[in-house]
Amino acid sequence: MYMRIARIAGPAVLAVLAGAGAAAQDAPGDAVLEEVTTVARKVQERLIDVPLAITKFDTQEIERAGIRNLDDVAALTPSLTFSNVIGEFLPVPVIRNMAPTAIFQENNAGIFVDGVFVSGREGLNFAQLDLSGIEVVKGPVSALYGRSTFSGAIIYTTARPTDTFTGRAEAQFGTDDKQFGKITLSGPIAGDRLQGRVALMYDNWEGSYTNHGGGDRLGGYEYKTVNASLLFTPSDSFEALLGLYASDDQIGTPALTSVATNCENRSLVNPMASGFANFCGELPEAGDLSTIPQAEGEDRDLVRSHLNLTWNLAGGSAIASVTGYSSLQQSFTEDASRSGPATFTYQATPFAPMAPGLLRTLQTGLLQIGPGDETQEFSQELRFTSALESSLRFSLGGYYYSTENEAAGDGVVSTQPLPADFFAFCPCVQTGPTTVVSLGFANPIYLPWFSSPTGDAILSPIVRDETEALAGFGYLEADFGQRWEGRLEARYTEEEKTVTDLLGDSPEQNNTWSFLTWRANLNYKPDEDTTVYGSVATGEKSGAFDTASVDFDGAGGAPPELLVFNVDPEKNTTFELGWKDRSRSGRLQSDLAVFYIDWTDIVIPQVITEVEGQVVNIPFSLDVNAGDATIYGIELAVVAQLSEGWVAEINGSWADAEYDDAVAETFREFPSFAPDGDVSGRKVLRQSKWKGALSLTYAAALNDRVDWFMRGDLTHQDQQYADSTNQTIIPSHTGFNARFGFQGERYQLELWALNLFEDDGPTGAFRDVRFDNSVSTSPALVGSVFPFRYTVSHPRLRQLGMTLRVNF
């Protein structure tokens, strides 16, 4: 299929690029593209000189494209996809198809704000307030940024204070009760030595979907955010930049559905198992959504601060210090059933008159409670960089990082009481027409949900996770003649992780890992505006450990043993060839990269039934290094000034990620994957082979005082597999955003339409379990504890609105 697409689309793409190039070269007038700079290597450089595949959005592009979050960044970036499978709990940016298989482990792509790593996963997709740039760096940059950039990095830079007074007010209104207001003030506080900047924002949106369960609309949010900074320059050689971001975020109940499994009947492999375990086919659209009114979504409080110090020394060298601190608090209430009430099968009391032992059903809402978790992070980087104009350049630095997370115990509570005739939850064995015997083990699981106002949730912290890391890093760069440049980067890291059980008697568990990551580049510049490069880079993801309370068969009533299992770091080696070019006319910029990735020791969740030859009484889940994969692909981005006022941008990527050797024991009872769950040869989950975007912008003078402009963005993302079986398909997406407006020196009015053609297919999914029981496929066994389902996320639908901006 893809070869057919390539044969059909390939000539068309080449024709578009050739036409853009010809039009750009022949464009009349003096219109040229602005030169783009980057801070991806922690110094200001021309983007065209940097041997990395980078997509850059500046302030104007962020505004014109209407970038609001990571979804919008990903839509316009080749080789970047983004999924948020359940509210803001599990945001997953995926660069070059390196999707994390263990969804609760750390992401493979790191996010940085003003040089500071963003920890606290629930806070990754934050309000895009007062930014001067967003850069997506593709490929591991672990040598510069650390183990969090296993597949790449997303770098945010906030706007700096100005030395003259400026101000801007912005108001936005749209469908689904969209209300947005922002005011920004910047200018001198104490002459030319101290400047300040502050931006205040209120952003409210009710969401795309009506809640047929009677609560608020689904998928909305309310952000109250402030971003402030101070720039202190007591001398020409020193500056201090202090920044603060704080946001009180109310994130509404997400637009989710629960889709029943329809394939892989486990009873064909294991007679004691029952029910379908997977979904085969393309996941359906949302339809009518319904959640219980008690589900209010997430409450997120986020504070970030940074202090960046720069000393410019004699001879052009510099010392830089970057200090970061953040605090994230989150709690939530969600509908555990996703859509519609949960149904429980139970055995009526044997003493009930008229119908002893008959099965009954109970329908109830289930509220999932997250009492809260808190993440605090501190980091300190100090580095020395030699003069950038020298033919031999180097940098040396040190880095310290610590984070602490305390989490309370999530739980479930029923919105309905137990019926008066309740005796026991099934599974049950039916021994006669009117006789049912309860197996008993479901009661300890479900009864707490009906016996306490907070169900089985534990409101105080139950576990503390701590990470502490120390690293040294540097690079050596040299020119060879006037056209060749070589660079070697390296970083050595030691990291310790500790887990403390705050309620039980389990001993504190810790583990330490050390690793070396590096990158080697060789660049050739045939002229000032062309760079050809080759690179080899390594990435190493942080190690971890997993614990399980294990009960062995034949243990003679002994208590379960707490076992600790090491999870080794994942590794990758990326080979890349690239070409960057800016035409002599300044009207055409091109960026091409071809890459190959060898990915090893992939962490894949497993269901474990035995340990060192001993069978366990109750199987448990464990993260295990259980796979290797190969990825290869190509990325292309072209920007062309077609003529005075017309700018076209086209980008695209193709990549294929496939398991070479991988086992997911979770699937061992699937008939198609029995007996061991081997998924070798399958595609890595949550990857899109094809991805692309086409943007066209036009701006012209309406009169001497006012310009008018329009912009259209057409984006496409290929289908994805929801898991490593490749049976469950998340459909492809094609979106179109349009903007039209007028701009003067002081005023700007813009009309916009997002997702104009109403692409409404699911955007993400993961296999989990229903929080109830259901009828078994076995004629004698009734009810299954936690039957499988798919939780499916749905997109924002069409939005229409208007934005007014005023400069003062």
Image (tube, grey):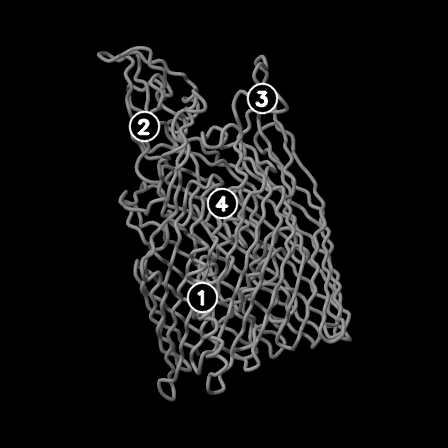
The residue wearing badge 1 is 11
- Give the mark toward the camera: 2 or 1: 1
Please, what secondary structure does the residue beneath circle 1 have?
helix
- Give the mark toward the camera: 4 or 1: 1
Residue type, label 2: Pro
Q: Quadrant of residue 532?
A: bottom right
Q: Which mark is residue 560?
A: 3
Q: Is residue 31 shown above or below 267? A: below
How many angstroms separate mark 3 from mark 2 (CA)? 33 Å
Q: Which residue is drawn at 58% across and 68% down?
A: 230
Q: Which of the marked residues, 2 or 4, is nearer the chain's N terminus?
A: 2
- In the displayed structure image, the side of residue 665 where residue 363 appears, left or right: left
Crowd tier of the residue under label 2, counting other residues whose Cα lies within 10 Å: few below 14, some 14–19, many 20 or above = few
Q: Quadrant of residue 187?
A: bottom right
Residue type, label 3: Pro
Q: Is residue 604 shown above or below 616? A: below
Label pair 4/3, CB-CB below 8 angstroms? no
Q: Which mark is residue 160?
A: none
How many angstroms separate mark 1 from mark 3 (CA)? 64 Å
The residue wearing badge 4 is 685
How many angstroms separate mark 2 from mark 4 (CA)? 40 Å
The percent coordinates of residue 507 (x first, y second) are 65, 30
- In the displayed structure image, the side of residue 275 where residue 604 appears, left or right: right
The percent coordinates of residue 631 (x first, y second) are 57, 50
- Give the mark toward the camera: 2 or 4: 4
Residue type, label 4: Leu
